[in-house]
Amino acid sequence: MTYHKLYKTGALLLCIITIISSCKKNFGEINTDPSVVIKPDVGFLLTYTEDQIMKYQYTEWIWESMEQLLRFTQHLTTDPYELTSNVNLRYNTYYQQILPNLFEIRKQIAARPDSASYQKMSAVTYVLQVLHGIKVTDMNGSIPYEEAIKGRSDNFFSPQYNTQQQLFDIWIGQLDNAIAVLSDNATAQVSYDAQDVYYKSDWTKWVKLANSLKLRIAARLELQENDKTKQLFQEVMQDPIGPITSVGDQLTYVNEDYFPFGTGGEITYRSQRFATIPMVDFMKKAVDPRLFIYFDANGLQGSYKDTLAKYNTSLPSFIEPDDPLIMYQGGPCDFTTQPTVAAYLKNPFPVGNNNAGNTVTNYFLISPVNTRFFSPNYNNIRTGLYKEVAVTAAEIDLTIAEFIQKGYAGSVNTNGTAADWYNKGITASIQTMNDIAEVAGSTTAFSGSGDDEINAYLQDEDIKLNGTNDLERIYIQEHLNFFRNPNEAFVFCRRTGYPKKNSDYYPREPMNEIIPRRFWTLDPGETNRQNWEAAMQEQGFTPNAQDLPTLSSQRVWYDKPAPDFGEGN
C-alpha cells in the first residue's frame, strides 16, 4: 500500500475517534464519546498521528514561523506583522489530533490477550507525545497532561494543569521507560511495519529519538536545574544505543501531499522574506555551503558591471563592489534601524535613464530567502517534494559539543572532544540541508558527497575551534543549523542570548521591536476555568493577555533565568 493510500485510510478511521472542535480549549469538546469507538486499527492511528504532527504546521509556517519566530531569531527579515490569533496552533493540535489517538493505541493494546507482544508498539506512543509536548510547553508553560484525555475514559473534562517542571520530570520518566522497553529484545514483538511512516518500526532508531528528546529537555533545564542537565547528558552518552548522531537516523518526513505553503507555494504570502545582514555577512566570510541553499542570489549577476560602467553609476555604499559573493546581500533585521538599506528590500536600484530612448535596468539588491528550498510548489510549478527533518543529527551533535565544552560530561566517555562533535555537527547540517534542497528541486551547494566543500569550510580560520571563543562558535553553528526549525531556533536564541549583541564574531543586530517570550491560552470556559486560572496565577501570567509588553515580560518557568535576546554571556 502506498503512503498516500495508507494515510487516506488512516484519516478515514480517525474520523471515528477524533472530534475536530473549534478553537476553544474546552476538554469537554476535545475528548470524544467512547461509545462511538469501533476498535480502529492501531497502525492507522499511528500513521495518522505521525502525519498530523508534521502536517498541522501548514498554517504555522505562514503565520508563526515566517512572520514571527524566524524574524525574532534574525534568520530572516520581513515586514513586522502583528502577532495574531493564528499563532499557537501547536496547542489545539496536541489535544485534538495527537494525544487522543496515542491514548487509544495504548488502550487497544492493553485490551489484547497477547498485549505483551505489543509493548514496543505502545512505547513509541510516549515518544511521540513527548516530542510534540515539548513544543507545546515551550510557548505555553503549564498545560494539562496527566489528566488531559480522561474525557474519553472517565467522562472527566476539568483536567489540572501540570507545571513545566512537572512536565519535564514526567516526560523524562516516560522516555526512560520507552527506552527500556524498546531496547529489550527478550520477547518477540509485533511491529507497525510501514504504518510507522517515520522509522518503519526500527526500534533502535526510536531509542535514538527518545534519547535525543532527553537532550532537548536537558538544554531547556540548564538554567533552572543545571545538575539535572548534566545527569541527563551523561545518561544519554552512556546509553549503548545513544541519540541521533548520523543523518541516517534523523526524524524525517516526506509526503507527496504536504506542502506547507500550499499548492501555489505561497512562501511570499503577505510579504517577501529576505536574508539578514549578520547571517549573510558571516556565511560569506568562510563561504558556507549553506549560503547558496538558504538564499537566492540578487540581481547583481551577469553583465551588471558593464551596465554600471556604461552609465557611470556606483552601487550604494553598503555594498562592497569587489565582493566575490556580491550577489548575496542581507537586509536589516529591523527596518527602522537602517532605513537606507531597508529601502532596497522592495525597491530596485535603477541604472540608466529614459532620455533618448535609453533603457533603465532595475537591480534588486537584497537576497530573498530561497523560495524553492521551503516551497517546491512555488508559483504552481512543482520542482520536487517538501522534506521535513524534525530532529537532525546536526542539532544533537552540536548539543553534545556544547555540553562537552561546558564541562557537563564529567568522567563519562563522550567518544570524542567538543571539536570532534562540532565538526560532525557542521558536516551533518550541510549534508542535510543540501539533501533537503535536492529533494525540493532547489539550488544545491554541491553534487555528490560535498566532502571538498565541507572540509574547506571546517578548516577555515573563522570556523574551526581556536580555544578563544569556542562556545560562541558552537552556538553560532547551532543557530545556522536551525534555519529550517523555527521553534528550536527560537528556543535556542531565547535560552542562550546568542547571537550576541556587539559580538566581534557574529553580532545580533539591534531591534526596536518588542519580542514576546511566550504565547497565550485563552479562558477555556466554565468547564475548566478554575484550573486554568490557577495555572495562570502560579506562573505569574496575566489571563487572556495578548499584548506584546505583557508577553515579553512574563516568561515560562525554564525561561525565567535566561538572558534577554542578544544578551548572552
Image: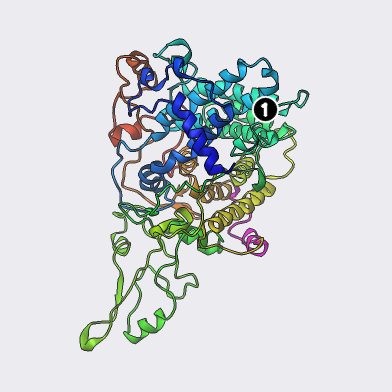
Work out whether 142 lies above or below 359. above
> Which of 398/261 is in front?
261
Q: Residue furthest bottom?
A: 356
Q: Position of residue 319 (x, y in %)?
A: 39, 69
SS class of the residue under badge 1?
Answer: helix
As drawn, is 128 to the left or to the right of 546? right
Q: Residue furthest right?
A: 186
Q: Residue at x 69, y 27 (%)?
A: 190
Q: Is residue 55 visible?
A: yes
Q: Position of residue 540 (x, y in %)?
A: 36, 22
Q: Residue at x 43, y 45 (%)?
A: 566
> Which of 415/171 is in front?
171
Could you tell me which quadrant the N terminus lies in? top right
The residue wearing badge 1 is: 179
Q: Is residue 302 magenta?
A: no
> Which of 168/210 is in front?
210
Q: Which residues are magenta?
A: 450-470
Q: Position of residue 465 (x, y in %)?
A: 63, 53
- Specify few, some or many for label 1: CA neighbours under 10 Å numbering under 14, 14-19, or 20 or more: many
Work out whether 453 lies above or below 392. below
User: Mark 1: which amino acid?
Assistant: Ile
Q: Position of residue 20 (x, y in %)?
A: 38, 28
As drawn, is 98 to the left or to the right of 343? right
